[in-house]
Image (spheres, helix red, strand yellow):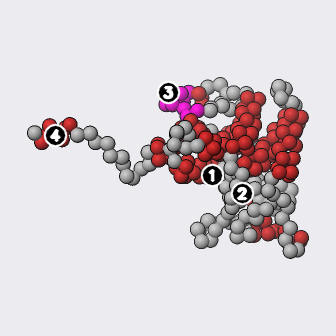
Amino acid sequence: MLALLFASCELNELPKSEATEEDIFGTEKGLKNCSNSFYRNITSGNDAYKGDAMADYAAVNSLNNFISQGAYSREVEELKSLWTWSTLRNINQMIAKCTSPNLSDKVKNNYIGLARFFRAWFYYDKVVRFGDVPWVDHPLAVTEEEILKGPRDSRELVMKHIMEDLDFAYQNISDAPGDGTTVNKWTAFGLKTRIALFEGSFRKYHHLSLATRPEVFFQYAVDAGKILMESGPYRLHVASDPKISQRELFTSEQPVKEEVMLAVAFSKNQALMNDANWW
């Protein structure tokens, strides 16, 4: 009798040590925590200041491999490790599963907009490195992994989708300025100006025969920049002494929100350090 009773019980208690899909995609707190994980996949603090290592005003004691004689094959080997797509799957998961009836459309579209912002940045990085890449707008199933090994989609298609993602992000993400370390709707158009200027210049000076002419991307940059300047909350930071205004942007304990659109903030209290001065 005891065995029969035990066998007929339905065990439906949820695990306490891990989140369910409803915990993540069915609550605003869950969506916020999920979107916070995307920040680790964009430019890090170290990448930001080391990105100018080969500029004329930098002082370095070594050269990047790709400009060293006979180093091309080594560079190709290094780039293989950058053909990674797990970040994209996480982003597409959020877009696909942000459908809970318990949340308002405004809340859902805010977090879908955030995900599409990070997808645009992800693909921008891939286009800069590889040119044509596969465009994937849904979470790949195990049976679909061959998509990433098959023919690449054209640069034209990928850049079109990047612009669409950023437009959606601008239209749907909250315009709250935050603390300068989080994305808002204005950040989306800030990124759009950068990507559009890059793509327009690349197409112009590499003489690419693509359907969308360079001038179109230059106009994207102008239009987004105009909206930012005329309607956005940002302006040039002016300190008590104009001579230290620029320096304060980088030495302040907190981002100078009046000018900074998105920053990586270091913190001694949180043990988030960098080696900028030494490097």
State whether residue 206 appears in this view.
no
Q: How far apart are marks 3 and 1 (CA)?
A: 29 Å
How busy is the neighbourhood of tag 2: few (under 14 within 10 Å), some, or many (20 plus)? many
The answer to the question of whether label 3 and label 1 lie on touching residues, with beta carbons closer than 8 A, is no
Q: Nearest to the eye among marks 1 and 2: give it.
A: 2
Residue 168, picture quadrant: top right
Label 4's element?
helix
Point out the image quarter for the N terminus.
top left
Give the residue at mark 3: 143
Residue placed at 62% from the left, 32% from the top? 137
Three-letter amino acid code at the position of disc 4: Leu
Three-letter amino acid code at the position of disc 3: Thr
- Estimate the x, y position of residue 275 in percent, counting from the top left: 68, 66
Three-letter amino acid code at the position of disc 2: Pro
**Label located before the other in sequence (1 or 2):** 1
**Label located before the other in sequence (2 or 4):** 4
Three-letter amino acid code at the position of disc 1: Tyr
Q: Nearest to the eye among marks 4 and 3: give it.
A: 4
Give the residue at mark 2: 177
Residue placed at 73% from the left, 35% from the top? 164
Label 3's element?
helix
Give the residue at mark 1: 39
- Estimate the x, y position of residue 268 in percent, counting from the top left: 62, 71
Q: What stretch is highlighted in magenta?
A: 138-146
Q: Is residue 140 or residue 16 the one in the foreground?
A: 16
Label 2's element?
loop
How busy is the neighbourhood of tag 4: few (under 14 within 10 Å), some, or many (20 plus)? few
Residue placed at 55% from the left, 44% from the top? 103
